[in-house]
Image (spheres, helix red, strand yellow):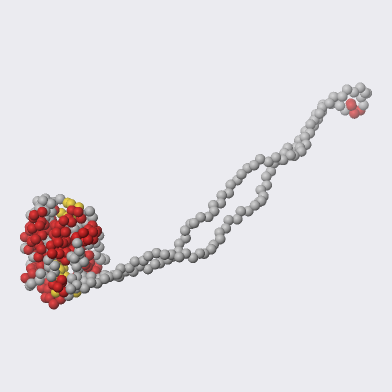
Amino acid sequence: MTKTVVGLYDDFNDARSTVQDLVDSGFRRDDISLVANNTTGEFDQYDTERGHRTHHDRGDVTTEEGAGIGAGIGAAIGGLGGLLMGLGVLAIPGVGPALAAGPIASLLVGAGIGGVTGGIAGALANMGVPEEEAGYYAEGVRRGGTLVMLAAADDRADDAAAIMSRHDPVDIDERAGRWREAGWTGYDRNAEPYTAEQVRTEREKYRTTDTGRTADTGRTADTGRTARPKQTTRSERDEAKLPVVEEELQVGKRQVQRGGARVHTHVTERPVEENVRLREEHVDVERRPVDRPVNEADREAFRDETFEVTETAEEAVVGKRARVIEEVVVSKDVGERTEKISDTVRRTDVDVERLDSERAVGQTDFETYDTDFRNHYNSNLTGSGYTYAELAPVYRYGYSLGTDPGYNNRDWSKVEPEARKMWEERNPGTWDQFKGEVRYAWEQARSHR
């Protein structure tokens, strides 16, 4: 069994001294990881391999050539480059530029070139740190801290914790409590990285109040307690939790429109005729010749007088009356039917294959192949535009395939499709560019098993 011992430091020099003490005490450098915030650019000036800074998009992050990987950075941090493997500066989501080294660097980059895939919290969780604490440590690095982590044998974990405690690590639970009091709600991988000024302010705040050292004298005050690094128990080859997932068929109901009737009403006109008898009056004036004596009545006619006779006539008057002559009734009949639903559900099954003891004893560390892989790089890839340190994750990916019992006893023709699939998931479109180096590392690791 192994335990993961983790410590966060406000001062990079404390973290560097911790790494040196761990190596001097016999802990393997391949088991030590370090991540240091580089927002202030304190490591950029020591980049001796490239003389200018340009940006290249690689995967989902941007790497800076001016913050490259090389021996210059090792010199910058007092020989730390000789203690840790895979030293380089990466742009990490939620943190910004950070110096990374050791196994955690490979997890941050994944199997690709310069593409951070999971962030610090994801890498820590993958190495056995509880998810909540992993967020605390990631936030600590985001605010300017330096993380040191060691995978130690169970019987030496307490020794490692004692060494790390001698160099003033942060009490991560107490520190997270302070952040929450100030309004922090938890680590957010998508949060904006701190600016250089914010990092300096954060470092100064805890350098004067948390560790007990004053900014002007550097003296250490008695705080009354020691922040002890966290220990997480893990298996020798990293404990893996494989969830067994099974799908259940759930059948519900929903309304869908299958058809129906659309009813339109409209008005039509048709001509009609009806006969009606109308009465009319006409005035006729007739003059009749008369020859008779005048009487008294006739004498009354000798005066002016006006008579009016009017004519009347009937006109047809048309009126309309509406009557209901028919009703159209639209209704729905509701019925039920039973339908049989057939589908498939999935579940994951985990098959465990026991490995014989001779094979386990024969395993070889990646460090053993370092010289061979460097020679292969110098002979074939010096003009590729990549440094060996940048291609080291490629060789490590092939090495991991060669040491995996599921791949080392199969022909490359059977291994390549699965290897390509896993690679392309994290580094789309780059397999053909690096598959030669992956296969070389796979063959070398496989031949020594």
Dividing the picture into quadrants, the one containing residue 214 is bottom left
Residue drawn at point x = 80 percent, y = 30 percent: 283
Left or right: where 270 falls relative to 43: right
> Considering depth in this image, is 386 or 78 the residue closer to the camera?
386
- Count the marks: how many? 0
The spot of residue 368 in percent (x, y) is: 9, 65
The spot of residue 328 in percent (x, y) is: 61, 53
Dividing the picture into quadrants, the one containing residue 18 is bottom left
Residue drawn at point x = 47 percent, y = 64 percent: 339
> Considering depth in this image, is 398 or 42 the residue closer to the camera?
398
The spot of residue 329 in percent (x, y) is: 60, 55
Left or right: where 416 falls relative to 66: right
Q: Is residue 209 visible?
A: no
286 versus 27 height, above or below: above
> Considering depth in this image, is 231 or 346 the residue closer to the camera?
346
Residue drawn at point x = 10 percent, y = 63 percent: 369
